[in-house]
Amino acid sequence: MKKIILIRHGQSVYNLENRFTGWKDVDLTEKGINEAKNAAVLLKNHQINLAYTSKLKRAQETLSIILNKLNLNLDITKDIRLNERDYGSLVNQNKEEAAIKYGADQVQKWRRSYDIPPPNGESLKDTYNRCIPFFKEIMKLNKNILISAHGNSIRAIVKYLLNINEDDILKTEIGWCEPWIFTLDKNIVMDLQILHYDKVSNSNLPINIRF
């Protein structure tokens, strides 16, 4: 048995400003830093052998805070394939202003369609095709692994692990710094726990999974 722990970075500056972030390298807010510290509390009783993150500093900072709070001195592998979905021409734009510029329906289609990318950007399908070959490499390791990444790269992994259809994965919400802990036996998911520090979780899995 092994565990794969997925955690989305804490709140970033662009999250706070309601901007499309994508591959833009932005810092965590003070709230985001505290969210990462709280995530460490949630993970204190979970053994972690290996740590992976993206090439973006908001995910790297989140991972560093968690490992420091847990007093874990692990080698960290940083890989671009774990990066957030690239929002292309939408990056830096305020989401409400983008809706005015392009039309609310069009922006919603870019954000919530599985295979329709924004101009010069990626769809969730593109993100899946980038991320999952790397994740399959990780799956070969018989270790407890912590992955600090992003909402859409984590969505891609969740889709793969649970074999979720396209409509349901688009409805899946990954809360900031809320660990998704998958227990696997021979790469078959046996259990899933979604932990949260606050009273109410910001994560949502729109389907019932029976293991």
Image (cartoon, rainbow, N blue to C red):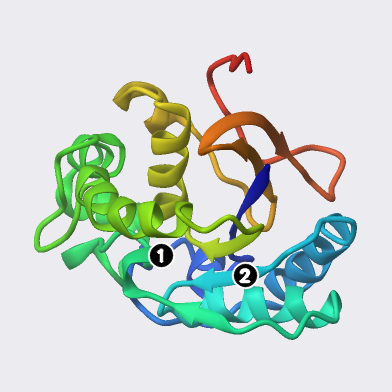
Q: Nearer the viewer, residue 85 or 79?
A: 79
Secondary structure beneath label 2: strand
Tell me the residue at 35%/77% (across/down): 24
- The answer to which of marks 1 and 2 sits earlier in the sequence is 1
Q: What amino acid is at disc 1?
A: Arg
* Res. 187 mark: none
Tell me the residue at 47%/39% (across/down): 158
Q: Nearer the viewer, residue 14 or 120?
A: 120
Which of discs 1 and 2 lies nearer the camera? The answer is 2
Q: Residues within 10 Å of mark 1 (few under 14, many from 20)?
A: some
The residue that label 1 is drawn on is: 19
Q: Is residue 124 left or right of residue 184?
A: left
Q: Quadrant of residue 43?
A: bottom right
Q: Nearer the viewer, residue 31 or 63?
A: 63
Q: Nearer the viewer, residue 57 or 69?
A: 69
- Above or below, 133 against 171 in this view is below
- Above or below, 210 against 165 in this view is above
Q: What amino acid is at disc 2?
A: Leu
Q: Give x and y (percent) for residue 39.
A: 78, 61
Quadrant of the drawing holding the N terminus: top right
Tell me the residue at 63%/18% (across/down): 211
Tell me the residue at 34%/60% (across/down): 134
The residue that label 2 is drawn on is: 50
Q: Quadrant of residue 202?
A: top right
Q: Quadrant of residue 21?
A: bottom left
Q: Give x and y (percent) for residue 88.
A: 19, 65
Q: Give x and y (percent) for residue 147.
A: 56, 62
